[in-house]
Amino acid sequence: MSFDALLRDVGEFGPYQKRVFVMLCLPCTVFSFQYLGVLFLGQVPRHRCKDPPETRQAATPHCGVSPAAARGNWSETRAAAAAAAAHGFGWDLRCKRLNLTSWAAILNSSSSSSCQPPALGVRAGWPPNASLSDHLVPCDHGWEFNREDAESTIVTEFGLVCENAWLLDFAQALLNLGFLLGAIIMGYISDRFGRRWSFLISIVLQTVSGVLVSLAPNYATFVALRTLQGIFNMGSWTTGFVIVTEFVGSSQRKVVHMVLQMFFSFGVIITPGIAYYLRTWRYLQLAFTLPNAIFITYYWLLPESPRWLLSRNRKKEVVAAFEKIARGNRRVLSSSFQKGFQAITAADMKSPSPSLMDLLRSPKIRKYTLVLMFYWFVVAVVYQGLALSTGNLGGNLYVAFLLGGVAEIPGALLAIALVDRIGRLPLMSVGPILSGLFCLASTLVPVEMEWLYVALVMLARLCMTMAYQMVCLLSNELYPTFLRNFAVSICSSLSGIGGIAAPFLLYRLYNIWKHLPLIIFGILAIAEGFLILLLPETKGLPLPETIQDAENIGKIQKAKRASRSNPHRDVIYSLGKAASNNMELECI
C-alpha cells in the first residue's frame, strides 16, 4: 500500500486540502510582484545631460540660441535625438552634452551662413551638426529626468542610464541569482527541517529583506538586499508548491499545480495597477513586500506535510496529521487505513541517495536530463525576456504590462484543458514553436502597424506560458522516485541561469537592433520545441519507481498504442505493463 492509497481513504482533495490550497495560492500571487516588478521599480523616464553651472549661466547666444535654449523641451530633445540617430550623426542629447568651451569656439568660427535652417529635421537655430558632434562630452554632471514619466525610480536615483544602463540589467540578473540559490538552499532546509518551517522562514526573511530594500541608500546595497530577497522569495514559492502537491491525491495534482501557476499570472495582472498609483520606487517596493507579512499568520494555520513526516519516520505525528485531514473532510480513519499504515511503516522505506552520476550513468536518463536542462533554460529566457520586453513595446507601459498578464491566462487554461487529452509532448512542442514563429513574425511588422506587433508578442507569451506550465509536470514524471527531487532541482536550476541571461539578451541586443532579441528568442523557442520530441510521452502512465522503470517509459507507451489497434491488445498491453514492474502512480 502506498501513501496515495492512505490519502484516498481520508479524501484526496476534500475541504481540508482545499483550505491549504487556497492559503498557498496567495503567496504565488505576491511572488509575481518581485519577479517582474523591476519594470516599474526601474522604469527609465526621458532624460538628458545635466549641464555644469557655468554652462547653465552662459548667456551668449548663437543665432539667437543659448546653450540652455538649444537643449529644447522634452519632446524636442527626444525628436532631435531620434533624428540624429536616424541619419547617422552619432550624437545623442540623452547621453552627451555640449562643452561650454566648444560653444565659445563655435561662436568664434561661425559665420552668418551657419544660421541657415539645418537639414534632416535637426532643430532650427543649432550650429552646423558636423562641427557640433565634435564638441560633445559625456554627462559628467549627471542627468535630468522628466518627472512626468516617473516621479522616482532606481534609475533616476542611482543614475542607471547611458553607460550605466547595464547596471539595471545586472540588478535583475542578481535577483535571478537569488532565485537559483534559494531553490538549492531552501530546498535543503525543506527536506531537512520540514516544509512548514522552510515556508515560514522564507516568508519572514523575504519580508524583512524587502523592507530593507526600500531603505537602500545606494545601488550596491540595493542589489545585495534584492539578491537576498530573491533567495527567500524562491524558498516560499517552491516550498508552497511542494506542500500543496504532497497534500492532494495523484488524480488532482496536475490541475492543482497549474492553477497555482495561474495565480502567478493574476499577480502579473495586479502589478501595473499598484505601480500606477505608487510612482515612487521606495513606496512601490513596500507595496510589493508588505503583503507577505500576512502570511506570517500561517504559523498557526499551515500544517506540516504528512508525507514529509512519514519520510522522517515520525509515526505519531503522521497519524495525527491524517486524523486532522479526515476530520476536515468529514471522514474517519477506517480499518483499512490502519492496516495500510502499519504495512508502510513496517516496510523498509530506505531509498538510495541520489547523486549527479545517477543522471549521467544511464543513456536514457542522461538524454532526459540534457534535453530538460536546455528546455528549462530556454523557457526561462524567452518567458522572462517577453515579459520584460513590455517596456520596449511602445505606448502605455501599464496597459501593455496588463495585457501581457491577461494573455497568460488563456495559455494556462489551454494547458489544463488539453494535458490529459493530447498529452504532454504535443503541448511542450507546439507551444514553443508557435511562440518562436510569433516572435519572428513580429520583426516583419511595419512601424505603422504597432497594434499587430504588440498582438504577436502577446501571442508568443501566451504560447510560452503553456510550455512553462508543462515542463514542471513532465520533469516530475520522467524520473524515478529516489532521484526525482534531485533531478528536478538540477534541471530547473537552468531556469535561474536563463533568468540571469534574459535581461542582458533583451536590453543589450535591443540597443544594437530592436528586433535582434525577438529573433534570438524565436530561434531558441523553435529549437526547444523540436528537441523536446526526443523524450517519451508520459500521459496516462504511473510514475517510475526505479531507473529501469524510467527507461521503460517509451516501451510502455508503444505497447499501449499497439494494444489499441490489435485484437490481442490485452495481451500486448500486459506485456508492456510488465516492463514497468507494476509502477504505481505517485506524482509529487
Image (spheres, helix red, strand yellow):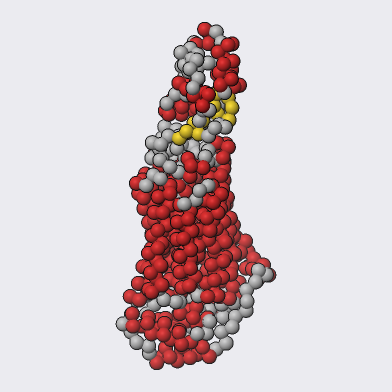
In the picture as drawn, the residue positioned furthest to the left comes out as 330
Q: Is residue 324 visible?
A: yes
Residue 486, relative to residue 81: is it above or below?
A: below
Q: Nearer the viewer, residue 111 or 30?
A: 111
Q: Position of residue 546 (x, y in %)?
A: 59, 77
Residue 507, relative to residue 119: is it above or below?
A: below
Which residue is found at the position 45% from the left and 84% from the top?
Answer: 318
In the picture as drawn, the residue positioned furthest to the top comes out as 112
Q: Position of residue 369 (x, y in %)?
A: 61, 64
Q: Is residue 462 visible?
A: no
Q: Position of residue 113 (x, y in %)?
A: 52, 8
Which residue is found at the position 55% from the left and 18% from the top?
Answer: 103
Which residue is found at the position 56% from the left and 49% from the top?
Answer: 220
Left or right: residue 370 versus residue 336 is: right
Which residue is found at the position 59% from the left and 17% from the top?
Answer: 131
Residue 236, relative to residue 456: is it above or below?
A: below
Q: Position of residue 333 (x, y in %)?
A: 37, 88
Task: Say how many tags the image has.
Answer: 0
Q: Nearer the viewer, residue 352 or 427?
A: 352
